[in-house]
Image (spheres, rainbow, N blue to C red):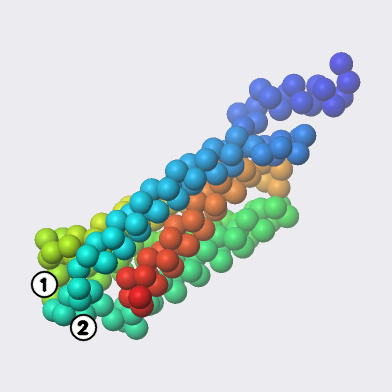
Amino acid sequence: MTADSHALTTAEHTPIAGLAHDARGGISNPILGMLLFLTSEVMFFAGLFAAYFNTRAANKPWPPTEFEHILNPFSLILVATVILVASSFTCQMAIWAIRRNDRRGFIRNIGVTFVLGVIFLLMQVYDYSLLFDEGMTLGSGQFGTTYYTLTGFHGAHVFGGVIMLGVVLYRGMSGQFSARHHDAVEAASLYWHFVDIVWILLFSILYFL
């Protein structure tokens, strides 16, 4: 048995073998699985957007006159948007850090990403409370239903992403990732970039169109 074949056999039986980059240049299982999952998520949100535009086309004026003044894009929601966009940058910085085996930089940036994600969720909950005070609820006609459905499902995805980032952060602090073994981090970053892009689309459609 050659040294290369022995190393390959050893790697196949290590706990982190599934996180390693494919030595033959292919896509690893964690990244492939995330790409397939995100494909289904694209179709899911595409369906939600289609339902929104269909409902919007059938109801005039849009938004209803009583709610037009409270959907101000230059308010708290803009700050939340900036925070989420910034978290995508820090997430990518964490990827760059672990690729060059800078574990301290990786942990720092993934930790900042985690905190920014939590802050975004808290700001979204607070924004909901402001809308409730103005009388806009899930039962406020088709506009209220579509608004909370779209933003609520996105918020649920952000919550899932925060949990994912928390797990990655914990494992990173335990020393489980390196320049050679970090595909789980790459997969988590793909998901986080996805929820960021979806929010930019949501924010633009709901507040500007």
Label 2, label 1: how far apart the Cα atoms are: 12 Å
How many discs mark residues in the rendered view?
2
**Residue at 60% from the left image edge and 29% from the top image edge:** 15
Point out residue 121 in the picture as x, y percentages from the top left corner. 33, 62
From the viewer's perspective, is 71 left or right of 19?
left
Q: Amino acid at mark 2?
A: His
Is label 1 in a helix, a strand or a loop?
A: loop
Residue 167 at least partly seen: no
Up/down of 19 relative to 118, above or below: above
| Image quarter of residue 35 | top right
Question: Upstream in the sequence, badge 2 or badge 1?
Answer: 2
In this rendering, would 108 be left or right of 63? right
> Which image quarter holds the C terminus?
bottom left
Residue at 44% across, 74% down:
82
Q: Position of residue 104 (x, y in %)?
A: 63, 57
Q: Which residue is mark 2?
A: 69
Q: Residues within 10 Å of mark 2 (few under 14, many from 20)?
A: few
Q: Position of residue 162 (x, y in %)?
A: 41, 53
Mark 2 lies on a secondary structure that is loop
Residue for point 24% across, 62% down: 55
Which residue is identified by label 1? 135
In-front residue for pair 41/10: 41
Residue 33 position within the rendered picture, expressed as x and y whole percent measured from the top left:
54, 38
In the displayed structure image, the side of residue 144 where residue 84 appears, left or right: right
Residue placed most toward the observer, 28 or 165: 28
